[in-house]
Amino acid sequence: MSLRLATFNVENLMNRFDFSGYRNQLNEDRTLALFDIQSEAEYKMLEQARAIAQSDDTRQLTALAIAATRADIICMQEVDNIEALKAFEYGYLFKMVGEGYRQKYTTAGNDSRGIDVAVMMRNETAQGQPIEFVRMTSYAYATFEQFGLFTPELAELGHQANERIFRRDCLEVDVKVGGVPLTLYLVHFKSMGSPRNGLDGREATMPLRVAEAQAVRRIIEDRFSKDHAADKRWAICGDMNDYRQRVKIEGDAFDGYRFQVIDESQSCLNVLTAGGFCENVVERRPEMDRWSFYHTRGPQERHLCQLDYILLSKGLAAKNATAVPDIIRNGQPWRTIFPAGQAVERFPRAGWDRPKASDHCPVAITLDMA
């Protein structure tokens, strides 16, 4: 009995418009910046038209990427609300693949933009085994103080002990697959922000991601008991906004690109994998072929890295020792630089940087659940 499990940051799956660009130039779309807009009312009208037109192309590509995972259960990040998820699934995904993800779950988290984690599940696996939703538990309200995770590093960055740990949520979802229990932990950790206190964006936000990872581990250990948790059936799925390796890119399309694998000395992932608690199964792939995200701030800063994870418990990973996850990169925009031998055929109408399925790539794995 097998289960196809996937995770995907679908990027801003919203059912509302953002008009903040009229007063904040940093939020203004580059298309509207080309035009002399005379009033806020005119701006709102144009922004609605732009967002609707762009969203249709984008969501077709998002749906193609999800369809390519062949997932029975897919964990998602950056979903606005259940209404947006239902509209996307029926209007795009169902019409495309013909077999709906009838079960959909999300809840309100802590993100100031309103986006959160979610899960979609089929009623049964590709093999015909029933998928049953059991329960869902949110940890969005957990604080540093409650979990004993407030540190001097967090205080130095201006955080308070009574603040919530998770920037979005840690959503615990219990299911049964063919009667076999499985617990999923849906996460979307703190993004790498702007430099502050003399630190770059990754370093400055690292204490928050470390605290989030510590909290997730604590939640799992409390649920299954510290001594036995690693042997139970569970997986952590989501965008952790961190990596243990990155592939640095130098050169250009004319003289050729050069790729260098760089190991990082610190990562929030180490908190979760320490002691064999769980395994990042993407690391079963070759070092140069683990990336799910292309980062660039221009030619001086470009790299490929893994931000999107399926972490299997020690027990579940051992049972699936030969399973190697797939990374679906066909929805990437054309600006993404692929190492030699990794080029894929892009989905139709993918643009230079948009439209795209997402800046992230879906990660999927087939698990033996017997």
Image (tube, helix red, strand yellow):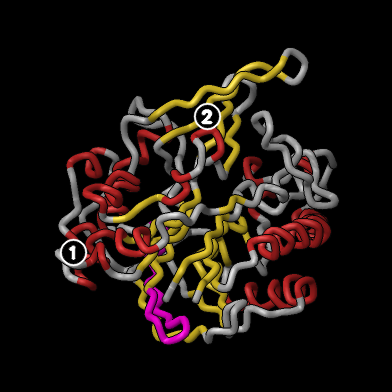
Residue 202 lies left or right of residue 54; in this view the side is left
Q: Amino acid at mark 1?
A: Gln
Instruction: Tell me which segment is drawn in magenta.
Output: 167-182
Q: Is residue 209 left or right of residue 358?
A: left
- The residue closer to the viewer here, 226 or 79, is 226
Residue under the image location 43 percent in, 83 percent down: 176
Marking on residue 326: none
- Residue at 52%, 66% (x, y): give it: 5
Circle 1 sits in a helix, a strand or a loop, which is it? Answer: helix
In this rendering, the answer to whether 20 lies above or below 195 is: below
User: Residue 266: x percent and y percent?
Assistant: 31, 34
> Residue 247 bears which disc, if any?
2
Foreground of the two, 160 or 183: 183
Going from N to C along the chain, the mark reached first, 1 or 2, is 1
Please, is residue 333 above or below residue 232 in the view?
A: above
**Number of the front mark, 1 or 2:** 2
Q: Main secondary structure of the magenta part?
A: strand
> Which quadrant would residue 339 be assigned to in this image?
top right
Q: Which residue was labeled with disc 1?
A: 146
Disc 2 element: strand
